[in-house]
Amino acid sequence: MVEKIIPFPLDYLFVGVHPDDVELSASGILLRCISQGKKVGILDLTQGELGSRGTAETRKIESQNASALMGLHARINLGMKDGFFEINEINHKKIIEVLRAWTPRAVLANAISDRHPDHGRAAKLIHDACFLSGLVKINTQDSLGNEQLPWRPKQLYHYIQDYLLKPDILVDVTEFFPKKMEVVKTYKTQFFNPEEKGPETPISSKEFLDSIEGKARAFGRYIGVQYAEGLVASRPIGIEDLDHLF
Ligand SMILES: [Zn+2]
């Protein structure tokens, strides 16, 4: 499956190796960005076709429903091989083509290390692609065959998934948390849904959804709010004014 990449300037690009990664781990931040009028897109690397429940087709419909609920401005799936994609030139260039077409200021990508090995491998692939995308001598074309200009996002963050990594930044998502859980539940085949008859998986139980809330509450407690999502920064964060922090 090859989708056409329509050039569209974004503020933030969220990248997930599986079509529900962003929704589970960073959709509170995403909803906050959209509420501020920012242009936001999601890049899915695979269709999640190895998931024990659902199919590539049902997951596509679920991700379209999630996109509509979030009010997302752009979303594309690169159709890499779930479980077996490699860190190589072909996959770097697929991501570079999206970065150059959508020119995001910041990228939020998978966790650097996690229970699912795809997450850490995707984090490395995306990290390298963000750097390589800024190099003038790497040539890529847009969907019309025109040469693309180099583009390197200013910031790359990694959202926190299963493993409780130590966050560098915590974002208050209290206002957006109820909607985040609505968005997560659009993935009807993946997460707890009493009407769905499929094999029990580590993410299909009610306890898993409870753990998403528990993690957000624990992160929120660190900064004195009800719910927060955490990010790991790929380099030290620079600020102009200490008052911007709380
Ligand atoms: Zn995943």
Image (tube, helix red, strand yellow):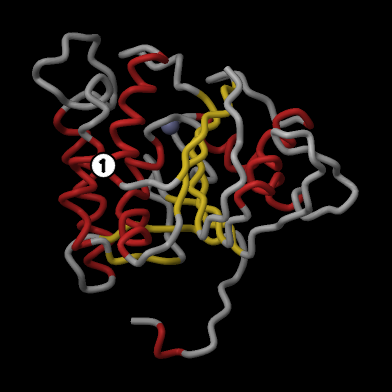
Q: Quadrant of residue 200?
A: top left
Query: Quarter holding the C terminus?
Result: bottom left
In the rendered view, does 135 fall on the left or right side of 115? right
Q: Which residue appears at 58% of the width and 36% of the height?
A: 122
Q: Which residue appears at 73% of the width and 53% of the height?
A: 131
Residue 190 location (% of width, % of height): 28, 23
Q: Which residue appears at 45% of the width and 89% of the height?
A: 242
Toward the front, the furthest residue is 144
The residue pinned by badge 1 equals 69
Q: Nearer the viewer, residue 25 or 31?
A: 31
Residue 218 location (% of width, % of height): 23, 58
Toward the left, the furthest residue is 194
Q: Is residue 182 above or below residue 53?
A: below
In the rendered view, does 229 fall on the left or right side of 236? left
Residue 57 location (% of width, % of height): 38, 14
In the rendered view, does 114 fall on the left or right side of 63? right
Q: Nearer the viewer, residue 100 or 114?
A: 100
Q: Which residue appears at 52% of the width and 42% of the height?
A: 113
Q: Name the amino acid, label 1.
A: Leu
Residue 231 location (% of width, % of height): 44, 58
Q: Nearer the viewer, residue 172 or 37?
A: 37
Residues packed near mark 1 inside 10 Å, few (<14), some (14 to 19) or many (20 plus): some
Tell me if the residue at label 1 has its CB under 8 Å from ligand 1: no
Looking at the rendered structure, the secondary structure element under dot 1 is helix
The quadrant of the picture showing ligand 1 is top left
Q: How many marks?
A: 1
In the rendered view, does 133 fall on the left or right side of 111? right
Q: Is residue 179 above or below residue 231?
A: above
Query: Quarter holding the N terminus?
Result: top right
Toward the right, the furthest residue is 137
